[in-house]
Amino acid sequence: MQMACPASIVSNVGGKIPKEPWLDELQRANKCVEPLGLHALQLLPELWDDEINDLQQENSVISLLRSWLDLEYEPSLDELRPLPPDGRKLWS
């Protein structure tokens, strides 16, 4: 049994005709004219920095955490305990 040289398979040096016709994937892609997956696209509303700042100031937990950050204050465990779990998670 004679083994084919890998180079002859790739470059078709031996003159063998491939069994399957060559497919140009780029031509196939050019034929696609419809959107493929817009079902997962969701546009979220944009918020400006001022709007985010106002929303954070309205939230009592976030406004407290921001004031600690602005003052570079390190709260004690006793000060963190009364915060809701989400507030403690944000601080950590």
Image (spheres, grey):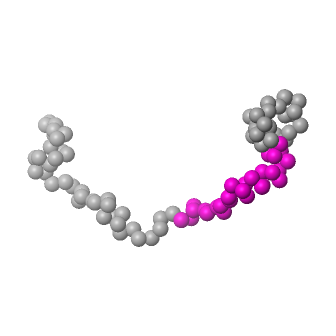
Determine which quarter of the picture holds residue 2.
top left
Question: Quarter of the image containing the C terminus?
Answer: top right
Q: Is residue 25 above or below residue 11?
A: below
Q: Is residue 38 left or right of residue 66?
A: left
Q: Which residues are magenta?
A: 38-65
> Residue 65, percent across and down?
79, 41
Q: Residue at x 41, y 71 (%)?
A: 33
> Residue 35, percent across and down?
47, 68
Q: Is residue 16 above or below residue 89?
A: below
Q: Residue at x 11, y 46 (%)?
A: 13
For this orientation, the residue located farthest to the front is 71
> Residue 54, percent across and down?
77, 55
Residue 86 visible in the current orientation: no
Determine which quarter of the picture holds residue 84.
top right
Q: Is residue 32 left or right of residue 11?
A: right
Prevailing secondary structure of the magenta residues: helix
